Amino acid sequence: MNVELITREDLREFKIDLLKEIKKIMQPGQGQSKQWLKSSEVRKLLNISPGTLQNLRINGTLRYTKIGGMMYYKLEDIHKLLEGGQQ
């Protein structure tokens, strides 16, 4: 059985790489980011439950557009939410 040890330095490097990737995704026009995200993508990005996302919609914290049965969210609005700004 092979055992791999993860050091604090490994975790620091992982953290730095992860933050770089998140910043790339969150910057409009950079990388492969989209202008509009589906509910599942928003939940995954913010690491929240469907109920929490629904509460953000209901209380007006996060704007959305509903087309058919699908709800879409602007990446720009999510970025503002993360920065603590109001729409």
Image: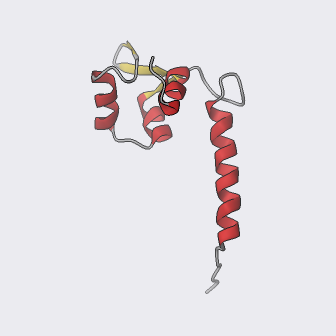
The image shows residue 59, relative to residue 23, as above or below, that is above
User: Looking at the picture, how far across and down is residue 19, in whole percent?
Assistant: 65, 46
Relative to 24, is 35 on the left or the right?
left
Q: How many marks?
A: 0
Q: How is the image coloured?
A: secondary structure
Q: Residue at x 65, y 79 (%)?
A: 4
User: Looking at the picture, how far across and down is residue 46, in whole percent?
Assistant: 46, 39
The quadrant of the rendering that contains the C terminus is: top left
User: Looking at the picture, how far across and down is residue 50, in whole percent?
Assistant: 32, 37
Displayed quadrant of residue 25 = top right
Q: Residue at x 28, y 30 (%)?
A: 55
The quadrant of the rendering that contains the N terminus is: bottom right
Relative to 70, is 15 on the left or the right?
right
Q: Residue at x 34, y 18 (%)?
A: 69
The image shows residue 12, relative to residue 59, as above or below, that is below
Displayed quadrant of residue 47 = top left
Taking the view exactly as shown, the residue that stands out farthest to the bottom is 1
* Observer-nearest of 51 and 15: 15
Q: Residue at x 64, y 84 (%)?
A: 2
User: Looking at the picture, how far across and down is residue 33, in whole percent?
Assistant: 64, 28
